[in-house]
Amino acid sequence: MTIELAPTYVYPDQPGVSSEFSLNADWDLEFINLPSAQAEVEFIGGAARNMLLNGEALCEAAAVGDSIAVMIEAFKGLSVKDEMSVLQQLKVHCEAAVTLLQTYASYHGAPYYLGNGRGAYIEPAWGSLLYSGPITYEKPFRTHAIDFYGTPLMPLAAIGYWIFGGGQQRNVHVSSLNLQMLARDFQPIASLLNDAGNVGHFEINAPFSYNVFDKAPIDVPAAGMLGRVSGNVKGVLDIQPDGTYTFSGSYSLNSDFYDADKSNRTWAQEALTTFLKGLGEAFGHTDYYINILGEQAVQFSGTR
């Protein structure tokens, strides 16, 4: 018996808007007689838009770095699809993250995060992966030294591993999260700044917690796969008599348990929760740990 998702959408159906998406199986026939080098370029350039469900809208959302829109458009494409279709699509998103890590990071000096304004690099990564040959769809999805790369696609990869990852631990470098944290986001720093009597030199090495969605939509890619995280911050805080301060140090984050738990999510994620739960209920899922590797250097200055 084929299992299919119910026609559930992130937002209600709109008149005149397609409620089902299919693949363009014949798109590559346009350049089948081209020289191989040119055909490769054409294939890579158009593969994502034609071989991913709702590919046009998905690529447009990825190009501008809108992670919430990426999730919405991907979920529209997955709606009413059987297990193999869902598996194939999510496997591409998981593997494309590794392709990006191996290509963009190598040639553009950004080892863990695709910077703002560079969303167009995502589409060639999809295309290169699809061009490289048949993708194996065995379960569970394989693990890598690093499983997530810092792009708007991170939440889709997290969902793929939740449904088809077999509960295996996954890894992301802290720099891929691109968290936009301020001094007062770290409780040990904030508590010192809030006491007007504190002036001088302070060594800090203490735990903290942080809701990744506090900076939405800036932190949305990370918030789509992490909720409230905890970690440790260390460094030196200097507070001057006039109230100005500087901090130089770093922070690390503890492993996070990915369980798609609505209680850990805020409004932007709750808008996607119904469909996400539908995926898990239809095809099964296994919660898993995401290990957050490395340390992130931070420097702050200001007036308390």
Image (cartoon, helix red, strand yellow):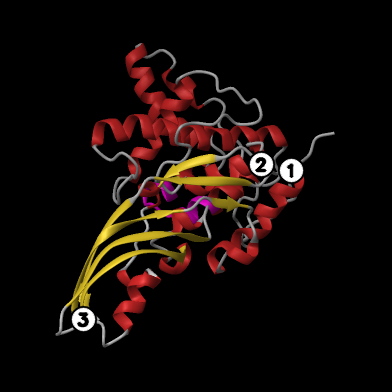
Q: Residue drawn 41% across and 41% down? A: 149
Q: Quadrant of the C terminus?
A: bottom left
The residue that mark 2 highlights is 163
Residue numbers of the magenta segment: 60-71
Q: Quadrant of the N terminus?
A: top right
Q: CA distance from mark 3 to mark 1?
A: 55 Å
The residue that mark 3 highlights is 199
Give the amino acid type for the residue marked by disc 1 in the picture.
Gly
Which label was assigned to residue 284? 1
Q: Nearer the viewer, residue 58 or 28?
A: 58
Point out the frontmost of discs 2 and 3: 3
Q: Residue drawn 49% across and 60% down? A: 229
Mark 2 touching mark 1, by CB under 8 A?
A: yes
The tag earlier along the polypeptide, 2 or 1, is 2
Asked whether 40 falls inside the magenta stretch, the response is no
State the image quarter where residue 81 is shown: top right
